[in-house]
């Protein structure tokens, strides 16, 4: 184990959490320790060949430069006497970096972060013959989201190559000041949008299940690996001029309505909120949940989602495109105010597309219908170990490499029967492939 010692130029700062930080802090608080380690995530950086053959100390210095540039990576979150969270941005300290030949990302991220005491990033340096070949970064989610993790990985590569970085990015104190001032009106519009849409939805998406006893563990999980879904979503993305993420979000929402037996449903996609120039290089947890609502009608059969086939999917996308834009536009708000106004409303169905940006917008040749349908035979359904604690009743995570799209669904067995997880995944695949 070595230590990447850092000393930043900015002064120490103490202040409230930014909106995105508050959102993820609330989710972690609901799960509690030790279950909040579920929110840890990683990025693996291959050391560029042009960086020479750096040893652990050289890599540690490059990591320290990144931490000095981004103040969220030297931030601790604590609880005040009033029970409210606040953050302290530190000036100096050291990031722990484990050194070894057999380190893997899961092991580096396994231990929970104590947000009040630990620096919110740690590293694993994978070495061979004294040379670092890979750097595994593990993040506490209060400090960074997936997009921010990509920024940190990019900056670490630059630091290894150039031994220098650009000046500091926007600081947390500047973001908080904006949200308390210039961005407040936008936040209020978003909260008002949520109030209207939640009232129209008229109740929880999933009522308590009729199952007599909850499953063990309570939160059941299932993964589908589907080359056909990957190819079909790319083809439909090009046809309708939307991202593959929007195609999958719409299909997921339809299938949620189907297994819940409702005429319409809603999902809460995670929106990265980096629409402003000043936020492009900002490392923090800036993402928040949007509200994507598919109302009854527009060709959908009550309790049955949408009719299968190209015509039915065409009608669906007519509503989905506008619903997605509304969700993305209204995903920037003060979560404390939203909670107050909604009065502890039902936790909805989360949708988190964790793929990098370049994987969401297809490039290259579009697969044809025959290629897509022939890939259906390659679909795999893979059981996953369950969880005892989670802050959501129904979660959909999209990951995977090109041509091997992975959809992981997690559900609270007190509200969703475990047998419905495979029904949901198969239905989502059938809907998208049938839309081609």
Image (cartoon, grey):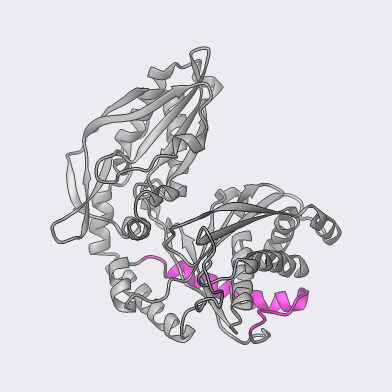
Q: Is residue 378 left or right of residue 258?
A: right
For the C terminus, give its image quadrant.
bottom right
Nearer to me, 291 or 420? 420
Percent x, y of residue 184: 27, 68
**Image-quadrant location for residue 57:** top left
Q: Up-down: is 142 above or below 168? A: below
Percent x, y of residue 124: 44, 29
**Image-quadrant location for residue 237:** bottom right
Q: Is residue 304 on the magenta stretch?
A: yes
Nearer to me, 24 or 218? 218
Q: Is residue 30 left or right of residue 327?
A: left
Q: Is residue 360 visible?
A: yes
Q: Is residue 125 left or right of residue 368?
A: left
Report the number of discs. Answer: 0
Q: Is residue 328 on the magenta stretch?
A: yes
Q: Is residue 334 visible?
A: no
The chief SS type of the magenta part is helix
Specify the farthest residue to the top.
Answer: 129
Specify the farthest residue to the front.
Answer: 212
Q: Which residues are magenta?
A: 303-332
Nearer to me, 215 or 349? 215
Percent x, y of residue 48: 53, 25
The residue depicted at 48 percent of the width and 13 percent of the height is 130
Percent x, y of residue 287: 41, 57
For the N terminus, give its image quadrant.
top left
The residue depicted at 66 percent of the width and 84 percent of the height is 300
The residue depicted at 47 percent of the width and 41 percent of the height is 42
């Amino acid at each position: 184990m070595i230590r990447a010692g850092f000393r930043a130029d900015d002064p120490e700062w103490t202040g409230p959490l930014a909106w995105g930080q508050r959102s993820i802090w609330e989710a972690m608080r609901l799960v509690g320790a030790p279950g909040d380690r579920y929110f840890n995530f990683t990025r693996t950086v291959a050391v560029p060949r042009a960086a020479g053959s750096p040893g652990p100390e050289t890599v540690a210095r490059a990591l320290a430069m990144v931490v000095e540039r981004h103040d969220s990576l030297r931030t601790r979150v604590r609880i005040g006497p009033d029970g409210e969270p606040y953050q302290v941005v530190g000036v100096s300290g050291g990031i722990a970096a484990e050194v070894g030949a057999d380190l893997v990302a899961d092991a580096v991220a396994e231990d929970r972060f104590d947000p009040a005491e630990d620096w919110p990033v740690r590293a694993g340096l994978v070495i061979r013959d004294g040379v670092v070949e890979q750097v595994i970064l593990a993040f506490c989610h209060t400090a960074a989201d997936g997009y921010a993790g990509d920024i940190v990985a990019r900056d670490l590569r630059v630091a290894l190559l150039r031994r220098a970085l650009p000046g500091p990015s926007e600081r947390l104190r500047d973001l908080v000041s904006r949200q308390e001032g210039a961005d407040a009106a936008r936040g209020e519009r978003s909260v008002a949008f949520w109030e209207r849409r939640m009232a129209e939805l008229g109740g929880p998406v999933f009522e308590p299940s009729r199952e007599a006893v909850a499953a063990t563990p309570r939160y059941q999980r299932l993964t589908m690996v589907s080359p056909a879904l990957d190819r079909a979503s790319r083809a439909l993305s090009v046809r309708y001029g939307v991202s593959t993420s929007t195609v999958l979000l719409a299909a997921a929402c339809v299938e949620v309505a189907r297994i819940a037996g409702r005429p319409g449903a809603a999902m809460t996609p995670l929106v990265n909120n980096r629409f402003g120039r000043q936020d492009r290089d900002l490392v923090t947890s800036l993402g928040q949940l949007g509200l994507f609502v598919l109302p009854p009608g527009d060709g959908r059969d009550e309790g049955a989602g949408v009719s299968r086939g190209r015509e039915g999917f065409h009608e669906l996308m007519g509503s989905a495109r506008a619903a997605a834009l509304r969700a993305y536009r209204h995903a920037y708000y003060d979560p404390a105010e939203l909670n107050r106004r909604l009065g502890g409303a039902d936790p909805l169905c989360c949708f988190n597309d964790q793929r990098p940006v370049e994987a969401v917008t297809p490039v290259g040749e579009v697969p044809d219908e025959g290629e897509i349908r022939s890939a259906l035979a390659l679909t795999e359904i893979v059981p996953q170990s369950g969880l005892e604690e989670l802050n959501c009743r129904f979660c959909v995570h999209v990951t995977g490499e090109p041509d091997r799209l992975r959809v992981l669904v997690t559900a609270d067995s007190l509200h969703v029967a475990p047998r419905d997880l495979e029904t949901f995944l198969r239905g989502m695949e059938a809907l998208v492939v049938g839309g081609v």
